[in-house]
């Protein structure tokens, strides 16, 4: 079973502490490492490797929900810019990385602290000091859930 399917299985059995909310086409989870505060992942319910492998109606809904998740993340974590990526080179199950960005969040990496998140060395992005848990995780999940539910009420 793939890593994303394992995470979804954990969500379904109430064993994924990063789970925030189930949407029609996917699951919203807070990233377990938070160098970029508010880093969120949107996991597609369907096990496909590419967006264009989804049936059109489901794919359209999935993109719409991903945009809503992006808006909620942006608001909840006061992003100045959102970076959204679906890579799948390591975990070939459709999922989205949503990074709320702020000026200087790359530190000394990149040109004048600007550039894609992947300019940050892997060891830095996933350093133990950025692993989130406990009260801080609970607060982040609640902030994001509030914004997701506001958007849900307005649609």
Image (cartoon, grey):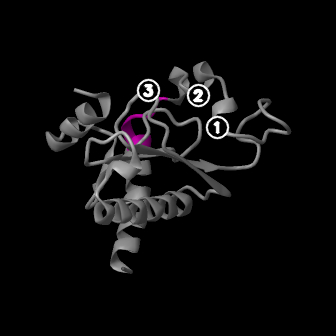
2 vs 3, front mark: 3
For the residue labelled by badge 3, is the local secondary structure a helix, a strand or a loop? Answer: loop
* Label 2–label 1 contact, CB within 8 A: yes
> Magenta part of the protein: which range?
131-137
Q: Position of residue 90 (x, y in %)?
A: 43, 26
Q: Residue furthest top?
A: 123
User: What residue appears at the point 26 percent right and 41 percent down from the top-left corner?
Assistant: 47
Marks 2/3: CA distance? 16 Å
The earlier-in-sequence mark between 2 and 3 is 3
Q: Quadrant of the C terminus?
A: bottom left
In the image, which disc is placed on residue 49?
none
2 vs 1, front mark: 1
* Label 3–label 1 contact, CB within 8 A: no
Residue indicated by mark 1: 117
The earlier-in-sequence mark between 2 and 1 is 1
Above or below — where is 15 with respect to 152?
A: above
Residue indicated by mark 2: 125
């Amino acid at each position: 079973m793939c890593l994303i399917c394992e995470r979804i299985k954990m969500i379904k059995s109430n064993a994924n502490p990063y789970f925030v909310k189930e949407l029609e086409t996917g699951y919203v989870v807070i990233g377990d490492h938070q160098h970029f505060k508010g880093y969120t992942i949107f996991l597609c319910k369907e096990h496909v490797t590419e967006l264009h492998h989804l049936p059109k109606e489901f794919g359209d809904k999935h993109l719409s929900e991903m945009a809503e998740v992006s808006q909620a993340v942006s608001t909840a974590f006061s992003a100045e810019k959102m970076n959204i990526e679906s890579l799948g080179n390591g975990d070939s199950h459709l999922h989205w990385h949503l990074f709320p960005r702020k000026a200087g969040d790359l530190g000394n990496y990149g040109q004048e602290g600007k550039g894609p998140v992947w300019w940050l060395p892997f060891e830095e992005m996933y350093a133990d000091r950025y692993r989130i848990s406990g009260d801080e995780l609970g607060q982040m999940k609640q902030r994001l859930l509030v914004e997701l539910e506001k958007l849900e009420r307005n649609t």
